[in-house]
Amino acid sequence: MLRPPVMNADRPNAGRRDPAGAPPGTAAGTGGTAAMIGRLPGRLPSIDPGNRLPLPEPEGRDIARPLAWLAGLTVIGAALRIRGLGGELWLDEILTVSSHAGRSIGELVLAPGSLNSHLLHTLLAHGSIALFGAEEWAIRLPAVVFGIATIPAVYALARVALRSREALLASGLVAVSYHHVLFSQNARGYSGLLLWTALSTLFLVRALTRDRGRDWALYLATGLLAAFTMLLGALVPLGHLATLPAVGLRLHRAGASPRPAVAKAALAAGAVCLAAAVLYAAAVPTMIAEVDPSRPRWTRGEEPFGFWYELTLGLRAGFGPLGILALLAAASLTVGGFRLARRHSVYVALLVAPLVPTAALAAVGFWVAPRFFLWSIPAAAIALVAAASMMGRASRWVVPATVSLVAVASLWALPRYYATPKQAVGASAEWVQRRSAAGEPVVAVSLAVPGIRFYAPRVGLDARRVEEASELEELLAIERRAGGRRIWMLTTHRRFLFTRQPALLEHIERCYRPLEEFPATIHRMEIMVWVGGCPAVGSTSRGRPAPDPARSTSGTGPGP
C-alpha cells in the first residue's frame, strides 16, 4: 500500500532523519546572535579614508545605456528559466516538499538536520505552496526568482573591476549558462546561494573601499542569508576571513595601515560565521556522520577519480560538443588571467574566497562533490571576461570571440535539457498504469519511493496497488503477497542500490526483466521499469555480489 509521506526518505548523502527539534536554548541563541549582529554595523569603528582599500581603475570599455542592456539580458535570462518550469520534480525536490509537511516554521528553522537541508528555500517554498498549491512551478518559484536576480547582481559585482561593456558580457554569460538555468529550475537552495555569494562579496568590497554603515549592514545581511540558505553558505564568510591577509598586504603596499580595515572585516565575517554555527549546532552530529571520510562515496569502477568523473559529466552536459573548444578558449587566456590577478589581487581573492575552506575540507578527507563549487559560476564568468579584456590589443576581438563561443556552447545544450525531465517518475508511473492490469502490484524501490508517493495520485495509479521496498525482506514479502501475479517495479540510482543494498539489487536483476528506461537530466536519476517476479518466492541471494554499475550504461548530466 502507498504509505503517507514522511519527512525523509532513503537517499544519497542523507541517510538519517532530521532531528525532530532543536535542543533547549537554540532558539534563544539564534535570536540573540541575530540581534547582536543587527546592532553590529553601528558599533564598528570607522576606518580613516587613508586606510581604506584602494582599487585599480576598471578594465575594458563603457557602453551607452548599460542599464537598458542589463534589463534586456535579465529578460532573456528570465525566459530561459521560466520555460519548462512546470516539468516533473526529481528526488531532492520532492523531499524538499515533504520535509515541511506537518511541521511548523519554527521546527524547520531550528532543526536544519543535514548537509542537504536548504532552509531558506524550504521556508519560501512553504509560502509559495500555501499561495499557489503544490504545483511544480510553485515549488520551484523561489529558486527561479533567485536565479533571475543573480543576473543583475553579477553585473554589479563585475563593475568593481570591469567597465560596463565587459560587466554586461559577464552577466550575459550567467544569463545563458546551462548550469545556472538548471539550478534556477531546481527547487533547492543553490540559486539562492549563488545570489547571496555574489552580493556578499560585492558589499564586502564596497565596505572596505567606502566604509559606509549601509555597506557593512548589507554584507552582514547577505552573509547571513547565504548561511541560512544552506550550510555550504557558511563557506562564504569563512573564505572572506581566509582572504583578509591579501587585503592587509594590499593596504600595506599602498602605504596604509591594514589593521583597521582587516579588523573590521574580520569582526563582520566572524559574526556571520558565529550565527551559522549557532543555527546549525543541533545538526552537527548528523552532519559529521554524513561527511565521514571513511564512508564510501564512489563505486569501484569510478575510483579514484569519482569527483572528476562527476565534474566531467556535468561540463559535458553543460557545453555539449563545443565544450572542448570553449575550455580551450578559456585556457588560452592565461596571460590575461595572470595580469588580472596581479592588478586586481584583492578582488580576485574575494571572488574565489569559498575555494579556501572547500579545499581545506577536501584536504582533511571530507567528501567534496562538484556542486560544492557552484558558487564559482558568477566568479568564472567575471574572470573569463576580465582575463580576455587584459590581453592587450588582441582584447578587441578576443573578448567578443571568447564570450560568443562559451555562450553558444551553453545555448547548444539547453534544447536537450528542456526536452528531458530531471527525473521522469510521473511519466514512468503513468506508463505502468496504462500497461499493467488491475490488481497487479507496482513496487517502488528505495530512492523511487518518494517520487511514487508524490506522483501516483496525480497520474491515477491506485494507491492500493502501490508497494514500497527499501530492503530485500520487504520485496520478498511483497512477492509472497502477490501470489504469482505479475509485479511491476520502478527503480532509480543504480549506484545507490549497488553500494547500500547489493542483495536487493542482485535479486531484482535475477528475477525481473528491464522493460523501459526513462532518461533524466540529473545523472543517475533515470527511472527503470521492471516486470516479473521470482518463481521461487522467499529465496534470497545474499551471497552473490551485484554487478559493478560502472559497467552499465547511465545518463549524462550534472550531479545533484
Image (cartoon, rainbow, N blue to C red):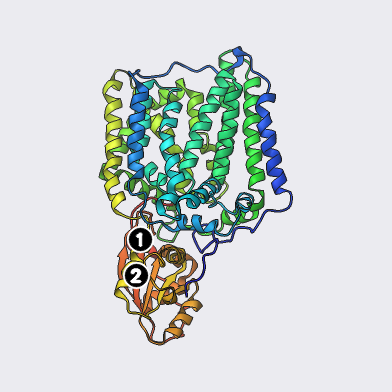
Mark 1: which secondary structure?
A: loop
Q: Quadrant of residue 490?
A: bottom left
Between 307 and 113, the residue placed more toward the observer is 113
In this picture, is 67 found above or below 535? Answer: above
**Residue 306: where, in percent of width, then height?**
43, 53
Check disc 2 and give the amino acid type.
Answer: Val
Check disc 1 and give the amino acid type.
Answer: Ala
Q: For residue 331, say whether it is visible.
A: no
Residue behind mark 2: 529
Residue shown at 63% from the left, 58% from the top: 19
Q: Quadrant of residue 59?
A: top left
User: Is 181 left, or right, of 200 in this rendering?
Assistant: left
Whichever of labels 2 and 1 marks the residue nearer the N terminus, that label is 1
Q: For residue 23, say whether it is visible.
A: yes
Mark 2: which secondary structure?
A: strand
User: Is 142 left, or right, of 332 in this rendering?
Assistant: right
